[in-house]
Amino acid sequence: MSPTYAAQTGVSSEASRGEIERTLIRYGATSFAYAWEASRAMVGFTANGRQLRFVLPMPDRAAREFTHTPTRGNRRTEAEAAKAYEQGVKQRWRALALVIKAKLEAVEAGIVSFEQEFGMHMVLPDGRTAAEHVIPAIDQAYATGQMRPLLQIGAGS
């Protein structure tokens, strides 16, 4: 299933990244970084004394949604497939800009604390995010019905 939010956006990926950076500055971030590789991009920043990282999975260029037309399933030309792929990339950057802006606004409005809203994206001293530590423990708890003590997350895994 293809994402629907901003599916037809005309906003470039570069403009969305710029918007993310400006939004972070407006809400008090003190540093910003961006990096990419073939299958993902990363936005990192420091805010409220914490380092945070969002990893944005990039779509697969070879996916049928890009190589074929949606209605009749005809094979696209290389140029058409490249254009469809770029649209998919732009859509993901728009969605990330929306997510970050919404999270920051929810914090500012007092709906949630910064830690509640951004906690899973916080980079811990070992370089991994809280999500990379916590999600396996949550999966294990659901699979086994047993919870590990929270202070021992990562121990014995």
Image (cartoon, rainbow, N blue to C red):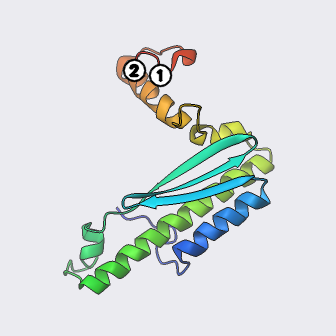
In the depicted view, which residue is nearer to us: 131 or 49?
A: 49
Q: Find disc 2 in the rendering and name its residue.
A: 157
Disc sitting over residue 154 in the figure: 1
Which residue is found at the position 41% from the left and 15% from the top?
156
Amino acid type assigned to the residue bearing label 1 in the image: Gly
Figure label count: 2
Could you tell me residue 96's position as x and y percent? 56, 60
Q: Residue at x 22, y 80 (%)?
A: 72
Residue sitting at x 43%, y 64%: 3
Q: Image quadrant for the N terminus? A: bottom left
> 21 or 66, which is in the foreground?
21
Q: Say which of 2 and 136 sits in front.
A: 136
- Amino acid bearing label 2: Ser
Asked where in the image residue 120 lies, by quadrant, the reply is: top right
Q: Quadrant of the C terminus?
A: top left
Distance Cα–Cα, label 1 vs label 2: 6 Å
**Apparent side of residue 42 relative to residue 28 in the rendered image (left or right):** left
Name the element at disc 1: loop
Residues at discs 1 and 2 in contact (Cβ within 8 Å) = yes
Residue 112 x %, y %: 73, 41
Looking at the image, residue 19 lies above or below residue 136:
below
Question: Is the residue 18 above or below the residue 155 in the image?
Answer: below
Q: Is residue 91 above or below residue 124?
A: below
Give the vertical position of 124 relative to 103 (above or below): above
Q: Is residue 134 left or right of residue 109?
A: left
